[in-house]
Amino acid sequence: MKKKTSKTSRTKASDEIRPEYDFSKGVRGKYAARFAEGTNVVVLDPDVAEVFPTSTSVNEALRALAKIIRSARPRGRRGRKSA
């Protein structure tokens, strides 16, 4: 037979910090600024990740491609329609 527990007893138990977790030397907000900057996570397919194994290699390749795209665009209006 299952033992009945009230909602309050489960909440109280999960709010407790285990004794083995020591946050006494922790720094509040240490990574807050980095988190606030935001992150773009892109998942590469395995075949692409094989060619570009690091974020640096991916960024270099994308910058080179962006440069080619920018130079191939016609000068002047960029095809935007005014509202």
Image (cartoon, rainbow, N blue to C red):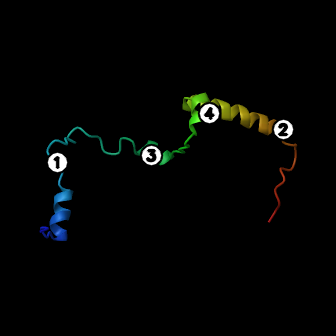
- Residue where numbered disc 3 is placed: 35
Q: Amino acid at mark 4?
A: Asn
Q: Amino acid at mark 3?
A: Phe
Q: Earlier in the sequence, mark 4 or mark 2?
A: 4
Q: Nearer the viewer, mark 2 or mark 3?
A: 2
- Residue where numbered disc 1 is placed: 18
Q: State the CA–CA distance, disc 1 to disc 2.
A: 60 Å
Dot 1: element: loop
Across and down, in percent, residue 34 comes to 45, 42
Q: State the CA–CA distance, disc 3 to disc 4.
A: 20 Å
Dot 3: element: helix
Q: State the CA–CA distance, disc 2 to disc 3.
A: 36 Å
Q: Earlier in the sequence, mark 1 or mark 4?
A: 1
Q: Amino acid at mark 2?
A: Ala
Task: Using a 10 Å C-alpha cutoff, classify the residue at mark 4 as few (fewer than 14 neighbours), some (14 to 19) or many (20 or more).
Answer: few
Q: Nearer the viewer, residue 83 or 58?
A: 58
Across and down, in percent, residue 46 comes to 56, 36
Q: State the CA–CA distance, disc 1 to disc 3.
A: 26 Å
| Looking at the image, residue 62 lies above or below residue 32 | above
- Residue where numbered disc 2 is placed: 72
**Residue at 54% over, 29% down:** 54
Q: Quadrant of residue 45?
A: top right
Q: Earlier in the sequence, mark 3 or mark 4?
A: 3
Labels 3 and 4 touching (C-beta < 8 A): no
**Residue at 19% over, 70% down:** 7
Q: Quadrant of residue 72?
A: top right
- Residue where numbered disc 4 is placed: 59
Dot 2: element: helix
Q: Earlier in the sequence, mark 1 or mark 3?
A: 1
